[in-house]
Image: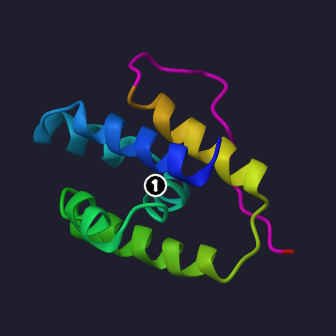
């Protein structure tokens, strides 16, 4: 998955829900997965999405975005996290969720 394709997939997933259901989904996504996906968006797009989160979660996701910018995350790992993020929007619970641990190099 290329960066632009990942960005488009994220925007499509976010655009396919009303505000309340989008907020409910985003609140269930782990902070690291939110951060990895939202980091691919532009500042304005990211701000619109972050505005849906509760204040504490918004702070944690912003801190995680800043943290992840300092790390090297292999592209294949990054896109695996994005795919996991997108699965939250597809409906249905998955038992074998990807662990969103980001290991520093």
The spot of residue 3 in percent (x, y) is: 58, 53
Is residue 40 a member of the stretch shown in magenta?
Answer: no
Label 1 neighbourhood size at 10 Å, few (<14), some (14-19), many (20+)?
many
Q: Residue at x 72, y 62 (%)?
A: 102
Q: Quadrant of the N terminus?
A: top right
Q: Answer whether residue 100 is visible to the viewer in this image.
A: no
Query: What is the chief secondary structure element of the magenta stretch?
Result: loop
Judge left or right: residue 63 versus residue 78.
left
**Residue situated furthest top in the rendering:** 92
- Residue 19: where, in percent of width, then height? 12, 42
Residue 63 lies, in percent from the top left, at 47, 78
The reply to whether residue 90 is in sight is yes
For residue 3, side relative to residue 53 (left or right):
right
Name the element at disc 1: helix
* Residue at the left extreme of this rendering: 19
The quarter in which the C terminus is drawn is bottom right
Residue drawn at 57 percent across, 37 percent down:
84
Residue 40, percent across and down?
Answer: 48, 61
Q: Tell me the magenta residue range.
A: 90-104
Residue 16, compared with residue 72, is above or below; it is: above
* Residue 54 falls in image quadrant: bottom left
Q: Nearer the viewer, residue 96 or 91?
A: 91
Camera-side residue: 62 or 80? 80
Locate residue 10: give its quadrant.
Answer: top left
Drawn side of residue 3 relative to residue 54, left or right: right
Q: Nearer the viewer, residue 80 or 95?
A: 80
101 inside magenta stretch: yes
Residue that mark 1 sits on: 34
Residue at 65% x, 47% y is: 79
């Amino acid at each position: 998955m290329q960066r632009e394709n990942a960005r488009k997939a994220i925007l499509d997933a976010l655009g396919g829900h009303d505000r309340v259901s989008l907020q409910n989904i985003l609140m269930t996504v782990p902070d690291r997965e939110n951060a990895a996906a939202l980091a691919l968006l532009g500042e304005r797009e990211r701000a619109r999405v972050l505005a849906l989160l509760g204040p504490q979660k918004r702070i944690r996701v912003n801190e995680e975005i800043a943290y992840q910018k300092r790390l090297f995350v292999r592209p294949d790992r990054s896109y695996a996290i994005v795919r996991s993020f997108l699965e939250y929007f597809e409906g249905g619970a998955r038992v074998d969720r990807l662990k969103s641990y980001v290991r520093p190099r």
